[in-house]
């Protein structure tokens, strides 16, 4: 037993099927009811310090190494920050290709999140055998779905590879644009793949909607709590994943701040340190930390948006909005549905880009120099709004770096979600594995990326411990 | 496009070059790639991803080169998945899991091998620890021996 654990504590460590290491501590009161919950992040990334002293133009190549799942978002935010320092504007075709690669990353990440990480819970059942409750179990029962999920993820990767020649760490995104053009042959190959990608995404949407219908009570009450939301929108309030302005909404749906240039993010977002985690607690600055907690990511983006940009996604968006009856949709489980609607927009938008007559033009990059001392870049990563903020010295070397990542911004909400689900499902000491899986699932809804940067063999054990009110071990489960 | 006869070994160097010893897999893979050995395809990746299956299928053997947080020295072994209690994670897909997925989804028994180099330091940084640097020649020798054997082996 961990001697530092207070009595009446349940610990789940680390959370499975998310990136990085984490643990959940649930405190019980004397009556064995849930009193509080904390979501701990144990990894310390240190990239901000590591990058000090480097020349700012190196950042779009360095920062993608923060995450193996969303490297493009880091590249995009980083390149934008560099372009602000240089005072340059990316050419039309360069922006088209960047946008397409970025959407491709959303497609890959969302496909992985839904088909491989989250769907086992509701396809195979929350309480099914945990050894099979993963993509392997899905593959056994629904091989076509599993294969399609892999193909969809591969399609997203192809959108990068066909431009840059690389899958994971995109070297094509540079300050000023893209270092590679798209060939006509690659454009056609990608266009040919689009119908299959739309079909698979629609299968996912139909699957989640069927689950919602059959489990309405569970879905609508699962970690359902009010919060503010932040997302990026276009000039007409349309949902944006690549570039736009920030919109904050209140828990009742009223707009708190709109069309905010991301470079003013520090006027709206502040952070405070908490003792039990390396992740800070960001909040909407005008409201203070007690009232200003907000969420980012797919659920937030759909809640803040007035409309989608593509027809099929718009149709689903209208159904999604109907759930909230004019209010934001607060149920955490709806992250999955929102993620799939975003995925649909991403696929449809890629088709639009590929059909643009200028997508294969060769003018993809402009060059520039160190003209300003400070740069801020923003993109919508799969998990939410991402900010890169660089300050340089006179020579262009970085003296200060602030990376505000999506998972950090969702940290307060993840804590709250764990607490809500724990309160809903944990009743007394007899806690079954399926109940703990639901607690973990609350975290998986956010699909957090905690330290997606090292993965060495032997580093991902799972230990779930259940302890009684005196600290005694009631149950322990080890996986992986 | 490689013909079936040309697809001898698919080498995947896995790891993050900016997480110290975690970068040893891609580093060794890149050294192998520079040798331009016929029939050997090499890629590097920060993560072992599920879609690698579609790339790997058709090769006689697949070799994953990776850093390890457990074990010692350099170990090159064939992966089996008898009774594997697979655990999926977008961050950490095990070779055993990949093997099981190939069997389940594509009804293919991959000849999957892992070369594991024991790492010591996985903190942020781009410098390998002294112990890993010492292991690289040994790892290269093991991998090259494996590749030579694969080249001379009869296609099954």
Image: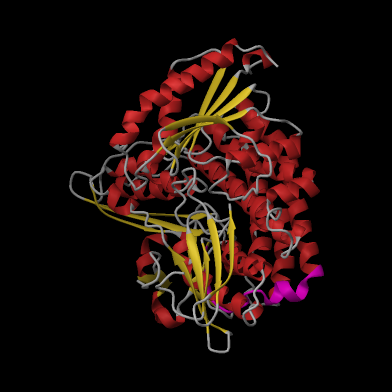
Of A139 and A47, the residue lying toward us: A139
Which quadrant holds residue B71? top left
Query: Taking B52 as reference, is B106 left or right?
Result: right
State the image coordinates of residue A461 (x, y, percent, origin top left).
Answer: 52, 54
Residue B117 appears in the picture as rendered? yes
Residue B31 in view of the camera: no
Residue A170, horizontal then vertical, whole percent: 47, 38
Q: Position of residue A438 (x, y in %)?
A: 65, 68
| Apparent side of residue B122 relative to residue A94 in the rendered image (left or right) | left
Above or below — where is A372 with respect to A217?
Answer: above
Magenta segment: does it hold A423? Answer: no
The correct choice, above or below, for A92 with respect to A288 in the image is: above
Q: Quadrant of residue B83?
A: top right
**Residue at the limit of the structure toward the bottom, as seen here:** A31
Eyeballing the image, is A381 above or below A332?
above
Task: Indicate left or right for B84 with A142 as reference.
Answer: left
Q: Is residue B84 left or right of residue A378?
A: right
Residue A104: where, in percent of width, then height? 59, 44
Determine the residue positioned at 47% across, 46% down.
A455
Exactly how many numbered labels are in the figure?
A: 0
Q: Quadrant of residue B74?
A: top left
Between A408 and B79, the one nearer to me in the picture:
B79
Q: Quadrant of the N terminus of chain B?
A: top right
Provide the residue span drawn in magenta.
Answer: A214-231
Picture quarter with the C terminus of chain B: top right
Q: Nearer the viewer, residue B122 or A278?
A: B122
């Amino acid at each position: 037993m961990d001697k530092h654990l207070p009595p009446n504590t349940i610990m789940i460590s680390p959370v499975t099927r998310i990136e990085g290491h984490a643990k959940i501590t649930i405190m019980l009161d004397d009556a064995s009811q849930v009193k509080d919950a904390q979501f701990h992040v144990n990894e310390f990334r240190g990239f901000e310090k590591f990058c000090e002293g480097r020349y700012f133009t190196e950042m779009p190549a360095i920062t993608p190494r923060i995450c193996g799942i969303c490297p493009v978002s880091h590249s995009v935010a980083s390149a934008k920050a560099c372009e602000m320092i240089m005072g340059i504007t990316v050419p039309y075709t360069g922006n088209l290709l960047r946008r397409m690669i970025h959407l491709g990353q959303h497609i890959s990440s969302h496909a992985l999140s839904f088909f491989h990480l989250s769907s086992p819970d509701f396809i195979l059942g929350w309480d099914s055998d945990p050894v099979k409750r993963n993509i392997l179990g899905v593959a056994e029962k629904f091989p076509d779905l599993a294969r399609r999920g892999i193909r969809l993820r591969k399609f997203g990767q192809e959108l990068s590879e066909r431009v840059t020649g690389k899958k994971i760490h995109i070297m094509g995104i540079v300050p000023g644009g893209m270092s590679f053009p798209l060939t006509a042959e690659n454009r056609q190959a990608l266009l040919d793949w689009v119908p299959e990608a739309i079909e698979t995404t629609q299968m996912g949407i139909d699957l989640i909607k069927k689950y919602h219908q059959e489990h309405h009570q569970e879905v609508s009450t699962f970690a359902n709590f009010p919060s503010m939301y932040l997302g990026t929108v276009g000039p007409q309030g349309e949902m944006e994943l690549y570039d736009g302005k920030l919109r904050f909404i209140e828990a009742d749906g009223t707009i708190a701040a709109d069309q905010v240039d991301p470079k003013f993010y520090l006027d709206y977002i502040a952070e405070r340190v908490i003792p039990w985690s390396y992740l800070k607690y960001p909040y909407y600055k005008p409201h203070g930390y007690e009232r200003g907690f907000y969420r980012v990511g797919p659920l937030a983006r759909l809640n803040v948006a007035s409309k989608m940009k593509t027809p099929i996604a718009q149709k689903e968006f209208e159904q999604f909005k109907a759930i909230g009856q004019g209010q934001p949709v607060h149920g955490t489980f709806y992250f999955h549905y929102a993620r799939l609607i975003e995925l649909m927009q991403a696929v449809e938008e890629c088709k639009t880009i590929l059909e643009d007559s200028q997508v294969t033009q060769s003018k993809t990059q402009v060059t520039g120099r160190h003209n300003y001392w400070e740069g801020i870049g923003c993109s919508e990563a799969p998990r939410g709004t991402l900010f890169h903020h660089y300050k340089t010295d006179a020579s262009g070397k970085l003296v200060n770096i602030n990376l505000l990542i999506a998972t950090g911004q969702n940290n307060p909400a993840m804590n709250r979600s764990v607490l809500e689900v724990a309160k809903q499902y944990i009743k007394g000491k007899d806690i079954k594995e399926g109940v703990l899986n639901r607690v973990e699932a609350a975290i998986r809804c956010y699909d957090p990326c905690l330290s997606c940067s090292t993965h060495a063999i032997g580093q991902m054990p799972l230990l779930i411990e259940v302890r009684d009110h005196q600290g005694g071990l009631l149950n322990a489960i080890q996986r992986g | 496009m490689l013909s079936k006869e040309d697809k001898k070994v698919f080498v995947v160097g896995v790891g993050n070059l900016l997480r110290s010893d975690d970068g040893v897999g891609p580093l060794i893979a890149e050294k192998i790639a520079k040798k331009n050995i016929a029939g050997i395809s090499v890629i590097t990746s920060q993560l072992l991803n599920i879609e690698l299956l579609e790339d790997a299928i058709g090769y006689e053997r697949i070799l994953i080169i990776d850093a390890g947080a457990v074990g010692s020295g350099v170990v090159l072994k064939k992966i089996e998945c008898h009774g594997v209690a697979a655990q999926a994670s977008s961050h950490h897909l095990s070779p055993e899991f990949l093997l099981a997925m190939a069997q389940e989804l594509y009804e293919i028994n991959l000849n999957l091998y892992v070369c594991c180099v024991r790492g010591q330091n996985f903190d942020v940084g781009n410098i390998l620890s002294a112990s890993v640097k010492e292991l690289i020649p040994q790892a290269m020798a093991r991998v090259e021996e494996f590749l030579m054997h694969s080249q001379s082996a009869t296609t099954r």
